[in-house]
Image (cartoon, helix red, strand yellow):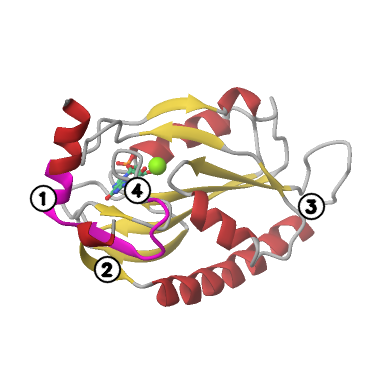
Amino acid sequence: MQNDIDQVLIHRADIARRVEALAKQIAEDLALASASTSSDEHDHAGRITLVPILTGSLVFVADLIRCLPVRMQVKVISISSYPGPSTTSQGPTILGGLDTLPKRLDGANVLLIDDILDTGRTLAMVIDHLKAKKPRSIHTCVMLRKQRPEEARFNADYVGFDIPNRFVVGYGLDYNGYYRNLPDIVTLRAEAIHQRRHAEAV
Ligand code: 5GP
Ligand code: MG
């Protein structure tokens, strides 16, 4: 697995530092948002609901929530944009979870979390679904934002790192289901991508 790495773009130590800083900022903002509504245990007013988009945000969310000392619920949803051995987006497909979200989120402060902001289609699609549940606010947080000047930028409220427009894996991100367990965010050697693609096709 290590032999397949081309370049380490973001080292685990830099990720850890940035996640802590992001969490600090988010915790302050969330505390303000929930304090400004009277919280009632029987509805969602003032509640904080984190909605991570799996599978890519798995590691990021696990680290982030442990740096967020606020009362919150976590409701995951699952979306795939890069099915199988693809390294370009095939467009977001909802795999599950939207039906397990509460029917209504009246008054809740929702934080939607994804691994990478690329074209923004994934976040835009989920926000459309969430809006129908009438939350008080929806904010977005992504670990990585790809620099794609040609794309209309959908802006996330919280961004970990800006990265070049390259296909990356590690820290939860996969290629064809693999490499999620790499602790750094890396690019893969062309041969590794070629080999894996070929192996799947056989
Ligand atoms: P968008 O809908 O913003 O175009 O795409 C975002 C989704 O595509 C992310 O949630 C992520 O799952 C996937 N994605 C985008 N770029 C990459 C990449 O470089 N590597 C991996 N593994 N997934 C990516
Ligand atoms: Mg994703």
- Which quadrant does the N terminus fall into? bottom left
Q: Residue 24 at what x, y percent from top left?
A: 60, 72
User: How far is disc 3 from disc 4 in space, using C-alphas?
Assistant: 28 Å
Callout 3 amino acid: Thr
Q: Quadrant of the C terminus?
A: top left
Q: Which residues are magenta?
A: 180-194
Label 2 crowd bin: few (<14), some (14–19), many (20+), radius 10 Å: some
* 84 or 127: nearer the viewer: 84
Q: Quadrant of residue 182 in the image?
A: bottom left
Displayed-image quarter of ligand 1: top left
* 3 vs 4, front mark: 4
Q: Among all residues in the image, which is located at the extreme right?
A: 41
Distance Cα–Cα, label 1 vs label 4 = 33 Å
Residue at x 72%, y 35% (from the top left corner): 106
User: Sequence-wise, which precedes: disc 3 or disc 4?
Assistant: 3
* Residue at 31% in and 65% down: 162
The amino acid at mark 2 is Leu
Mark with earlier residue (2, 4): 2
- Give the percent coordinates (x, y) of residue 163: 27, 63
Whether 114 is among the magenta residues is no
Identify the residue under disc 3.
37
Question: What element does badge 3 sit on?
Answer: loop
Which label sits on residue 9? 2
**Left or right position of 144 against 33:** left
Kindly identify the residue that appears in the image at 19 percent across and 34 percent down: 199
Asked whether disc 1 touches disc 4, contact meaning CB atoms under 8 Å apart, the reply is: no
- What is the quadrant of residue 26 in the picture? bottom right
Residue at the disc numbered 1: 191
